[in-house]
Amino acid sequence: MSITQLDHLRETLKDLRCQHRDLDSEISSMESLTYIDSLELRRLKKRKLSLKETIVKLESQLIPDLNA
């Protein structure tokens, strides 16, 4: 993987982590409300999980292959 690709991957990870953090805040705020839109809350949690899975996948690409 070239340096440019690694830089792009790191930047993408940074953006995804930010989105994940924002979703976490939004979910926490929503859960503290008296009235909770459970459908919207479920969607946010699924989106957060999807982001986390993508982050883990991209992070694994940054780890050098030990067999190389």
Image: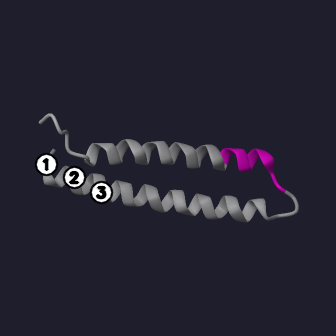
Main SS category, magenta section: helix
Q: Give the labeled residue for mark 1.
A: 2
Q: Are discs 3 and 2 less than 8 Å apart at CB?
A: yes
| Category of crowding for the residue at label 2, using alpha-carbon neighbours closer than 10 angstroms: few (below 14), some (14–19), many (at least 20) | few
**What secondary structure is found at the residue carrying circle 1?**
loop
Image coordinates of residue 62 in percent, x first then y, are 26, 48
Type of the residue with mark 2: Leu
| Category of crowding for the residue at label 3, using alpha-carbon neighbours closer than 10 angstroms: few (below 14), some (14–19), many (at least 20) | some
Region of the chain picked out in magenta, as a range? 36-43
Name, please, the residue furthest toward the right.
34
Image coordinates of residue 2 in percent, x first then y, are 13, 48
Q: Give the labeled residue for mark 2.
A: 6
Name, please, the residue furthest toward the front.
66
Type of the residue with mark 1: Ser
**The stretch drawn in magenta includes residue 14:** no
Name the residue nearer the viewer: 60 or 27.
60
- The reply, left or right, for residue 51 in relation to residue 58 is right
**The stretch drawn in magenta includes residue 41:** yes
Classify residue 68 by image quadrant: top left
Image coordinates of residue 10 in percent, x first then y, are 30, 57
Q: Give the labeled residue for mark 3.
A: 10
